[in-house]
Amino acid sequence: MRESFLSLLDSGDKDTYTDTINSDFVLVMGFMPSRQKSILKRLRENRSVVYLSAIEDKNMISIAQIQSRYEAGSEEGVLAIMAKELLSNSNVDTKTKDFFDNLDDGYISAESNIGEEELGEIDKIYKKSTKPMLVLGYDFYNHPRRKNIANIINLFIKYGNFKVFVQNSEDILERSDTDQELQEVAQLDSFDGSVVYTCPPLNRDEEELLIGSQQFALVAKVKDDDDIFVITENGEYRRKFMLDKELKGTIALLPSANGDESYYYKIAKIIKREN
């Protein structure tokens, strides 16, 4: 999945991709850095980090200058309105200008939960930077809109002087898809109810757990240490619910070492197992 997504990115300049994180503006999106310790360690060495994700990461509180949550599934829209904000003074081509002009900023902002004020604060940091960088994660690799997401990311590279962090930069291949036309941002899907997020486990024992906040527990009607079934469109998982009082929001973590090729956020039905 990773290599397939990377092949959608513009491979014109190999200097665009780097396996180091050393920047005066680092935009982190699409994964939980605390689940990838080597990246988390590198982020600590940078002074201007912005972290945007559908899940707040408690380990990023002391690292990120700005940390904000967007709605699950809204990555394409968030990237689009951010590109429009950050590249507002760039000399973009006619097609890109038309793409920005036709964006429904109000709708995307309201549905994604990323407001104009946040975008403005991020833009202030970006405008002061000389070597901005994107650190993007696995949420983009199997996103249903990954092709257009890659096209939007290429705008940051082409017009914003952004470098892209890739752990193995030799994995950047010739662009596999010749369709590089920007598409209109799709209507955002609704993720109402109990939502689970398939993420890398920190240890083997975590693969027996569903880890959620108090807010999630109320929505799913479960309590700490309950034996449960987690049912999604992709299958059924036997887990034990673990309450994490530091976790926020209504998305629970479903640690799994073997993620499938579908989008990692899923609406789930939670059923208590009978003893």
Image (tube, helix red, strand yellow):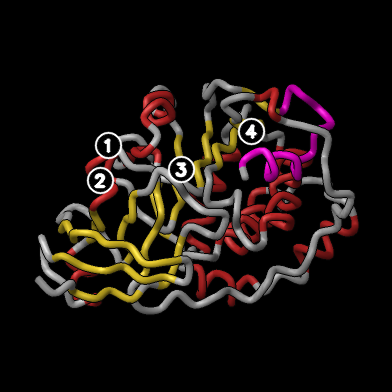
Helix, strand or loop status at disc 1: loop
Mark 2 or 3: in front is 2
Cα–Cα gap, marks 2 and 1: 6 Å
Q: Residues within 10 Å of mark 2 (few under 14, many from 20)?
A: some
Q: Which residue is mark 1?
A: 203
Residue 87, percent from left and from top? 70, 49
Cα–Cα gap, marks 3 and 1: 27 Å
- Asked where in the image residue 172 lies, by quadrant, the reply is top right
Q: Indicate which disc residue 50 carries.
A: 3
Q: Answer with mark 4 or mark 3, whichever residue precedes in sequence.
A: 3
Q: Indicate which disc residue 164 carries.
A: 4
Residue 15, percent from left and from top? 74, 22
Instruction: Magenta stretch: give its range.
Output: 2-16
Cα–Cα gap, marks 4 and 1: 29 Å
Cα–Cα gap, marks 4 and 3: 15 Å
Q: Residues within 10 Å of mark 3 (few under 14, many from 20)?
A: many
Q: Answer with mark 4 or mark 2, whichever residue precedes in sequence.
A: 4
Q: Based on the picture, tell me whether residue 162 belongs to the magenta stretch.
A: no
For residue 29, side relative to residue 69 (left or right): right
Q: Which residue is mark 2?
A: 206
Mark 3 or 1: in front is 1
Looking at the image, which residue is at 59% across and 77% down?
107
Query: Nearest the camera: 253 or 69?
Result: 253
Q: Amino acid at mark 4?
A: Val
Q: Answer with mark 2 or mark 3, whichever residue precedes in sequence.
A: 3
